[in-house]
Amino acid sequence: MERYNYIIVDDENQSHIKLRNHFKPYKNYTCVATFSNPEKALLFLSKHEIDLIFLDIEMPQMSGFQFLEALQKNIFVVIFTAFESKYCLEAHHYYDKDLVFFSNKAQFSYYLPKIITRFEKMFKDKKVVERVKQLSKNEIILFPKKIEKKTVALEDILYIEVIGHNIILKTKNNKEFITRMTLRELLSFLPVHIFFQIKRNMIVNIEHITAFTDFTVCVGGQHHTIAIRKQQEIIPKLIAQKQKLIENYESK
């Protein structure tokens, strides 16, 4: 189960107690700090990594909206206030700034399951985006059999194979790399029109397939079996790719 940490920023200490009590059933959530002074919260956030902020709006030192403007990090925020109708319209301007939910304090316990669901989906999506950003210039950050960090261009990958607990990337220069990503993570990043999963433990680069039958593909001089459940999906794509190459050749 994924674990999350959060802080509370509210000038009313009673709100800190109530909110933490609401979170008792959610064992994977940890309140790491509470703040009555938003300026101290900003200082804390400049030095620590936090997943979620619960933020009041009306505070003496600065408003919750001023706090969001001063926040230098992209952190998910739930605004909860006793004056929902007063600030509702202004709060909606922050939905493009990692705002998860805008809630009335009196109804917070009712909305909490919805807040949790929405936050965890947004958090997961954000992690995917961060992973994608690692693929700068179509490169995957890898950890070869040596310790140093290297990158591999997607176009150089022949196939990706799961062997034991390792994910091995075989490249066209006959090198092998081990990545710390899971196969599922790799599938979410790889261009689907180029990389096909032919069986549970293997993904191949269609541009490096030199031959195929109804149940095998040849990549890098090696033949690999296509899973029966994948054959009806993969073979038509390979035929279409072959036809495209023929048409390109004839047009030259």
Image (cartoon, rainbow, N blue to C red):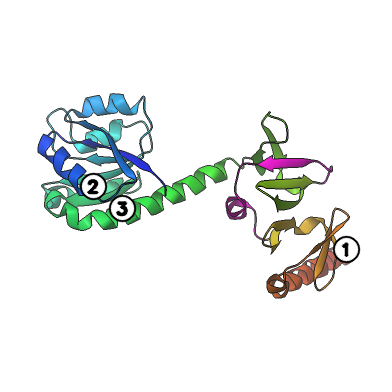
> Which mark's residue is nearer the viewer, 1 or 2?
2
Instruction: Report x, y in % for residue 7.
Output: 27, 36
Q: Would you place residue 199 above or below residue 152 in this image?
A: below
Residue kind at label 3, given as amino acid type: Ile
Q: Earlier in the sequence, mark 1 or mark 3?
A: 3
Q: Would you place residue 12 above or below residue 162 in this image?
A: above
Q: Secondary structure at mark 2?
A: loop
Is 92 placed left or right of 164 in the picture?
Answer: left
Disc marking residue 24? 2
Residue 247 in view (yes/no): yes
Q: Secondary structure at mark 1?
A: helix
Which stretch is magenta? 172-192
Question: Is 26 covered by the magenta stretch?
Answer: no
> Which mark's residue is nearer the viewer, 3 or 2?
2
Q: Are marks 1 and 3 in contact (CB under 8 Å)?
A: no
Toward the viewer: 166 or 60? 166
Instruction: Report x, y in % for residue 180.
Output: 61, 41
Q: Earlier in the sequence, mark 1 or mark 2?
A: 2
Residue kind at label 2, given as amino acid type: Lys
Is 149 placed left or right of 213 in the picture?
Answer: left
Crowdedness near tag 3: few (<14), some (14–19) or many (≥20) residues, C-alpha within 10 Å: some
The residue where tag 1 is placed is: 249
Residue 12 in view (yes/no): no
Toward the viewer: 243 or 54? 54
Toward the viewer: 151 or 133? 151
The residue where tag 3 is placed is: 116
* Corner quadrant of residue 39: top left
Residue at 26% x, 45% y is 78
Residue at 74% x, 73% y is 236
Residue kind at label 1, given as amino acid type: Tyr
